[in-house]
Image (tube, rainbow, N blue to C red):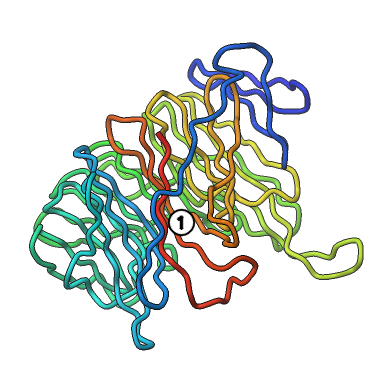
Amino acid sequence: MRCVLVAGAAVVGLTGAVLVAPPAGAVVEPAGAGAASQAPPAWKLVKVNALPRDDVLNDVATLKNGSVWAAGHRVVNGKVKGVVERFDGKRWTLLPGVPAADLTAIAASSPKSVWVFGQGRASRWNGKSWTTRSLGKRFSAADTDALNVKDVWAVGAQTASARHWNGKSWRSFALPGQASAVDIYKARDVWAAGLNGSQPTIMRWRGGSWKPIALPPVTLPSPDAEVGFRDLLVMSPENVWAVGGISWEGANEEGDDVTFSRTLLMHWNGTKWTTLVGKTGGQPYTQVTPDGTGGVWVVQGAWNATLWHVTRSGWKSTPLPRRPGTDAVLSSVARIPGTATTWGVGFTVPQSDPDDPSANGAFWRAR
């Protein structure tokens, strides 16, 4: 592990790759030609839903067969109904009989084993119909991951607890902290990330109970600052990424009350954790996913997000595409296994009017 300063940016050696942390609001252009001068893969707005009233997509899952599954909700006659949308590579389909709830998370291990999560329950699609099981009234899934039909995990941010599906039933586990993200590396090696008190936390399950992982403390800019991880990526036990942010209340130069924020990234190389905290003004990182070629995508913010492509050459940014006259929210990203194709879901609204009820679910793709 090494850390030096180059042109005002921290350069960190991570398992053989040199990654450049971008200053807040700037794009780092590493020296050199070839890959360093190439633009990041282009993102494309693939589809915007046209359902009656509003619909929002909260999470996305992908399968090796190229199918894409998204979950969220729509409002019909003033009532919230769940939405699950599938793309099989050719056609888009709204699955029938979806549970009437705001679906916050989705995991898929096969086209006949897709789980969606609403408040206090999980529902499984078997290719023909839905079966719903209780998870406890207080449990609301913040994230989920599926290894196979008998190994599915979900974490609930507000309850410091997790749920595990073993093929027959859901079992409850206590967590050392509140989790916003979960990632299954392999059977009996599961990671989660979030916050514990005033510090970010990463937890690991290897059978038995969940254990916290020792992390370097994050210096807080204010006693009331909130800091935590939003997402987690375990490429291997020697290559772990956790992203999030720090936020706190304060006053600007005019004396107005404002919310300040900074980005937060930690990386584990098998020996040490490296912490990168951005400058004040940078919206938190919200998502991290592999790009399929050895690098990663890091999403900054959700509202009109910035997509950072992180490779051996450094960081390159690209804005989230959107139609003229609209704003967009990117809720979740996922790569199709075995490929360099990444999908994202969220929604769009008329520009500068986040309270407008006419939200439309949206799909993006990079390849």
Q: 164 or 286, which is in the foreground? A: 286
Q: Is residue 114 left or right of residue 269?
A: left
Judging from the image, what secondary structure is the residue with disc 1 in? Answer: strand
Residue at 75% over, 49% down: 280
* Residue located beneath label 1 in the image: 331
The furthest residue to the right: 254
Looking at the rendering, in which quadrant would you find the N terminus?
top right
Q: Is residue 60 left or right of residue 180?
A: left
The furthest residue to the bottom: 77
Q: Quadrant of residue 31?
A: top right
Where's residue 24, x and y in %? 72, 41
Q: Is residue 156 left or right of residue 224?
A: left
Q: Quadrant of residue 264?
A: top right
216, above or below 257, in the image = above
367, above or below 328, in the image = above
Where's residue 133, x and y in %? 17, 70
Residue at 38% over, 45% down: 343
Looking at the rendering, in which quadrant would you find the C terminus?
top left
Where's residue 269, x and y in %? 48, 25
Where's residue 43, x and y in %? 48, 40
Q: Label 1 is placed on what type of residue?
A: Ser
Residue at 25% over, 55% down: 92
